[in-house]
Amino acid sequence: MDLSPGLSYFFGQLQRALLSPGSQISIASLGCALAIALVFLAVRRHRKGRRIRLRPLLRALFPAKILRSESNRPDLFYFFFNVFIFGIVFGWALLSYEVLSHAVTDALTAMFGPRQPGALPIFVARSIITVMLFLAYELGYWLNHYLSHRIPLLWEFHKVHHTATVLTPLTNFRVHPVYMCIFLNILAVFTGLANGVGDYFLGATTHQYGLSETNVILVFFIYLYVHLQHSQVWIAFTGWLGRVFMSPAHHQIHHSRNPAHFNKNLGSCLALWDWMFGTLYVPAAEREPLDFGVEPDREGAHTIWGELVAPLGRAVELVKGRLLPRSAPAAVLPTTDRNEAY
Ligand SMILES: [Zn+2]
Ligand SMILES: [Zn+2]
């Protein structure tokens, strides 16, 4: 049996994930996050009048409790799943951003007439479309995340991300394929819409500035703090900065088990949409006591079966519960009991 096509696919995907400058998990961006975290912790120690030594800093960044946690297993599994398998298995289920973009431009042309030649210099037009696509990405991310927290059926799939009891940059990949499918389709709609509108009003097909096809503003945030959102390093933006940008502490609050933090901070790089739609919780400058992970004691909370297959079963049960008429015994339950049961 010739394994070479499989192997070259495997190494191609791995190379893209780790070496492409625009990748979500490039070695360069991880190195950048590590450097930022080290400098941040060193400055904090210095301010407290403590000596700066590398070993305590590394211990603070990589505590044994995190390294040995069984929560890392599904993170690693989902990293491999999303990098190597998702595209093959679910690629067909994704809407095309380009098709949607053309449809929007065609619709605008039908309504308002042919687009006029662009009057702006090309670098201005490309900068505008880059900002538009970044804001559309952020809005699509926020909406998908909001729906995933508010609709019980979608929560079953998003809950996988929230069962993590420790946060590492790999936790970013701990997302169920059904969640990914919905997320990528919503993103395609928002970015396709933004691109179509941009192309029509800018007067030409304009390409965003990107690094290996990823929006350059998004790449900037990946290097700056996106990895640290899934970490124990408390870097908190407060004041107006905390209303605009989603600091690492913002997202750690999002994973908190404290009910005061539930359904807060749903954005990706920006806090702007959370601020606008009333789901923002600006973290305190000093670390708040946090525990991570919903249902940490549920059986199979960190197994592949519990994280990949069980959500499908629970979703089916949920749909059946909604579609089928309630059984007779449930109908005779006292009202108070029923309310408690739900
Ligand atoms: Zn969430
Ligand atoms: Zn997260």
Image (cartoon, rainbow, N blue to C red):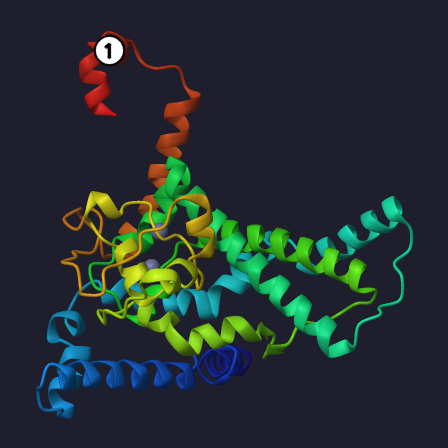
Label 1 crowd bin: few (<14), some (14–19), many (20+), radius 10 Å: few
Count of numbered marks:
1
Q: Is residue 19 above or below residue 150?
A: below
* Direction from residue 2 to residue 179 in the image, left or right: left
Q: Residue furthest left?
A: 50
Viewer-closest of 248 and 231: 248
Which image quadrant shows ligand 2?
bottom left
Q: Is residue 209 above or below residue 113?
A: below
Measured from the top left, where is residue 192 in percent x and y? 67, 56
Measured from the top left, where is residue 234 in percent x and y? 23, 69
Q: Quadrant of residue 342?
A: top left
* Direction from residue 128 to residue 224 in the image, left or right: left
**Residue drawn at the location 28% of the way across and 45% of the way down:** 262
The reply to whether residue 148 is visible in this rendering is yes
* Direction from residue 23 to residue 173 in the image, left or right: left
**Residue drawn at the location 63% of the way across and 69% of the way down:** 130
Viewer-closest of 64 and 302: 64
* Direction from residue 176 to residue 305 in the image, left or right: left
Check disc 1 and give the amino acid type.
Pro
Measured from the top left, where is residue 141 in percent x and y? 49, 55
**Residue drawn at the location 35% of the way across and 72% of the way down:** 227
Secondary structure category for the residue under label 1: helix
Cβ of disc 1 within 8 Å of ligand 1?
no
Q: Residue furthest front?
A: 239
The residue tagged 1 is 329
The reply to whether residue 312 is visible in this rendering is no
Viewer-closest of 203 and 24: 203
Measured from the top left, where is residue 57 in percent x and y? 16, 85
